[in-house]
């Protein structure tokens, strides 16, 4: 199993599937993601998911049929497993040369293709857990792509295990591989009705043993300022410069919590896009907080700023719209505690210490949970995602497969 898992993982990371920000005329954002999708359809068929298909958007879906009697099957919830096929636009994923550092003996790991890229023990204390084990990295010139090809490899290896071990009883399982997750669009065309799972898990997390059940509450604010443009030579008393007003608004945010000044469970306001001219300027701002109260507070703060500036500049027109993007997954997952509980039990049964974790960001699972499909996130074992020093221990990948098998078993037994 270990060898097929490794081979499978290498096969996927060697394919460039980088997604691209800002593409509006096609989905997925890059055609090359479909190349991997086609191969995955084939491999899913080989491990027993006969109905595996890719749709026009590049989503791969498949069913692994239940192996219990029709009567028993009805009582077992349909469980979905999801992973994404694209890699981050931040770092090249072309010509990835994955390598195994066999029998790791401690110390820093220099990457052969770029002498400036070193995986240090100081920044990666997790390394100490893997003395004598095999560690996988890129050659340092690209990312590795364990995010999330490790998740894909682990899911398919779990299916292969189930195929070879019919004594493991399970209900219907749904598999979904998604494109464009890294640009925040992984669920955009995801057909929940076709997927038809009762509950699901994304396999897209980090450290071995972690189950992520919390994300930010997220809102997006768009503030626009309309000024008045007059030829500057004749502008006295007439011109209203929206650039100056919008910078005043941003200046007022200076003392509020920001991503660069917060960590752990603290939320923030984050202006991330600014466009402007004398006549009209707009700024987009992310609002993030783990607590509903916190997001409410940030919404109010922003509205207050806009109101006071409108007072200060009565001849400008300030418009502030704030839209909810997604909720903390935790609030929604609480509706069915078994989903998280069984995941923790599955981790424990594989001999790891389960740990609940929160994500300072959104996940596809958060968006799906918000749409009604409860979807916490399970670990892949990978570390340093989106960087050239990305690494993953092979034993952590094996534990991920074991955890998935245990989880399927638990749902099959306890219903
Ligand atoms: Zn990912």
Image (tube, rainbow, N blue to C red):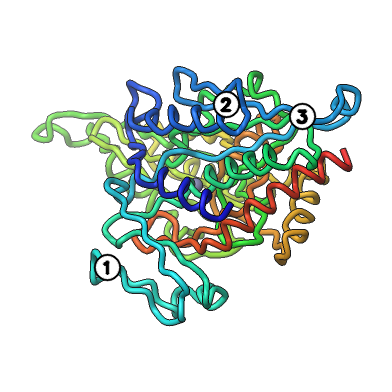
Residue at image position (59%, 44%) is 157
Q: Secondary structure at mark 2?
A: strand
Q: Position of residue 94 (x, y in %)?
A: 28, 46
Any part of residue 231 in sight: yes
Residues at marks 2 and 3, CA–CA distance in whole angstroms: 16 Å
Q: Position of residue 275 (x, y in %)?
A: 29, 38
Identify the residue position indicated by label 3 in the image: 66
Q: Are marks 1 and 2 in contact (CB under 8 Å)?
A: no
Residues at marks 1 and 2, CA–CA distance in whole angstroms: 38 Å
Residue at image position (76%, 29%) is 66
Mark 1 Cα-neighbour bin, 10 Å: few <14, some 14–19, many ≥20 = some
Q: Secondary structure at mark 1?
A: loop
Looking at the image, residue 105 lies above or below residue 156: below
Give the foreground label among 1 and 3. 3
* Front one among 54 and 167: 167
Identify the residue position indicated by label 1 in the image: 112
- Does mark 1 have its CB less than 8 Å from ligand 1? no
Identify the residue position indicated by label 2 in the image: 61
Residue at image position (30%, 62%) is 140
Residue at image position (46%, 52%) is 146
Q: Quadrant of residue 391?
A: bottom left
């Amino acid at each position: 199993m270990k060898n097929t898992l490794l081979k499978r993982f290498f096969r996927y990371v060697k394919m460039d599937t980088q997604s691209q920000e800002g593409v509006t005329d096609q989905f997925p954002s890059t055609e090359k993601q479909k190349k991997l999708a086609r191969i995955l359809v084939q491999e899913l068929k080989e491990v027993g998911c006969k109905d595996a298909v890719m749709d026009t958007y590049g989503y791969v879906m498949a069913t692994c049929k239940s192996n219990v009697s029709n009567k028993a099957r009805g009582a077992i919830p349909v469980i979905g497993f999801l992973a994404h096929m694209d890699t981050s636009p931040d770092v090249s994923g072309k010509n990835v040369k994955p390598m195994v550092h066999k029998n790791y003996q401690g110390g820093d790991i220099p990457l052969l293709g770029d002498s400036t890229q070193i995986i240090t023990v100081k920044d990666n204390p997790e390394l100490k857990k893997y003395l004598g084990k095999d560690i996988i990295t890129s050659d340092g010139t690209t990312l590795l792509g364990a995010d999330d090809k490790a998740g894909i490899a682990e899911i398919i290896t779990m299916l292969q295990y189930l195929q070879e071990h019919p004594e493991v009883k399970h209900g219907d399982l749904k598999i979904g591989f998604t494109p464009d997750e890294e640009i925040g669009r992984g669920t955009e065309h995801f057909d929940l009705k076709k997927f038809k799972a009762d509950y699901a898990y994304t396999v897209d997390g980090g450290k071995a043993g972690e189950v992520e059940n919390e994300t930010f509450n997220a809102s997006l604010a768009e503030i626009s300022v309309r000024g008045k443009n007059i030829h500057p030579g004749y502008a006295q008393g007439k011109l209203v410069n929206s650039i100056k007003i919008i910078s005043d608004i941003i200046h007022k945010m200076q003392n509020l919590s920001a991503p660069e000044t917060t960590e752990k469970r603290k939320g923030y306001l984050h202006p991330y896009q600014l466009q402007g001219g004398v006549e009209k300027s707009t700024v987009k701002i992310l609002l993030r907080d783990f607590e509903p109260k916190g997001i409410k507070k940030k919404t109010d703060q922003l509205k207050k700023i806009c109101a006071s500036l409108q007072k200060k500049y009565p001849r400008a027109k300030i418009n502030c719209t704030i839209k909810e993007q997604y909720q903390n997954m935790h609030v929604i997952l609480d509706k069915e505690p078994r989903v998280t509980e069984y995941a923790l039990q599955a981790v424990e049964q594989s001999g790891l210490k389960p740990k609940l974790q929160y994500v300072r960001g959104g996940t596809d699972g958060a968006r799906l949970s918000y749409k009604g499909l409860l979807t916490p996130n399970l670990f892949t074992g990978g570390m340093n995602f989106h960087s050239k020093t990305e690494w993953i221990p092979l034993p952590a990948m094996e534990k991920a497969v074991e955890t998935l098998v245990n989880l399927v078993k638990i749902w099959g037994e306890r219903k």
